[in-house]
Amino acid sequence: MIPEPLMRPTVGLIPTNEFADDGHTIEPSVSVPIAAAHRFAATAAPDPELRTVIADTLCEQGRFGQKTGAGWYDYQAGKRDAIPSELVNKMIDDHRKEIGITPRKISDEEIVQRLVYALVNEGAHILEDGIASKSGDIDMVYLTGYGFPIWRGGPMHYASQVGLYNVAESMKRFAKNPRDDASFWQPAPLIQKLVAEGKSFS
C-alpha cells in the first residue's frame, strides 16, 4: 500500500505483496479496509498527530482499491494497471499544508532504506525473542512468502551486505527527524551488539 511517489524506487527490491501492493495483488481488493479497521481498533480516539489521515480518508470515500475502481491509485474497468490519482495527490498536498509540513526531496536510496531497514530491525527483535533461531529463517519467509527478490537474499542478508554499522547509522539519522518516531528507529539491541563486535547476522 504505497503511494505513487514511493513506488518507483522499490521496484525489484522490496516485496510487492507487502509494500507495493496497490498496483499488484493484495491492497486493491482487501488491505485498505483491513488496514483501516486495524488502525481504528487499536484506539477509540486516534491521536490526530499519529492518525494516517489520508489512508482513513480513502476508506471514508469508498476508495478500497481495484474492487471499487479507486484506492491510492485509480483503475480502469477490466484492467489492473495502477494509474496515479490526481485526487489522492491533492489530498496529500492539502493535508501537508494543513499540518504545516514543508516537503523535501527524498532520494530513492532513503526510501529503500526506510522500508527495508524497518524489516531488518523487526527481524532483529524476532531473533532476540527466540521466535526465529537464525536470520536465514526470516529471509526464507520473505523470499518464499512475500516475494522478496531472491537475488537480494532477503532483508537480513541484504542488511549484512550493506553492513550493520551503516544500517544502524541510517536508523539513527531517521530518528533525529522531528517528524519521525524516534523510538521506532532505535536499533534493536542485537544490531547494536553485532555492530560493536564488527559482525553481521550471518
Image: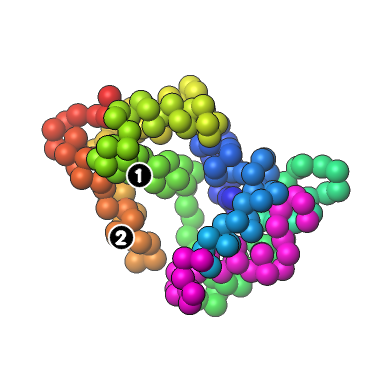
Residue 151 is situated, as x and y percent measured from the top left of the image, at 48, 22
* Quarter of the image that includes the C terminus: top left
The residue type indicated by label 2 comes to: Ala
In primary-sequence order, the first of circles 2 and 1 is 1
Name the element at disc 1: helix
Name the element at disc 2: loop
Residue 136 is situated, as x and y percent measured from the top left of the image, at 36, 25
Identify the residue shown where x is 30% and y is 60%.
182
Residue under circle 1? 122
Residue 134 is situated, as x and y percent measured from the top left of the image, at 30, 28
In this rendered view, identify the residue nearer to me: 63 or 158.
Answer: 63
Identify the residue shown where x is 39% and y is 46%.
118
Residue under circle 2? 182
In this rendered view, identify the residue nearer to me: 124 or 130.
Answer: 130
Magenta part of the protein: which range?
41-68
Q: How is the image coloured?
A: rainbow
Query: How many residues crowd around disc 1 within 10 Å: few (fewer than 14), some, or many (20 or more)?
Result: some
Left or right placement of residue 53 versus residue 87 in this view = left
The residue type indicated by label 1 comes to: Glu
Q: Is residue 19 above or below residue 74?
A: above
Identify the residue shown where x is 41% and y is 29%.
139
Q: Single out the mark in the foreground, 2 or 1.
A: 1
Left or right placement of residue 82 versus residue 133 in this view = right
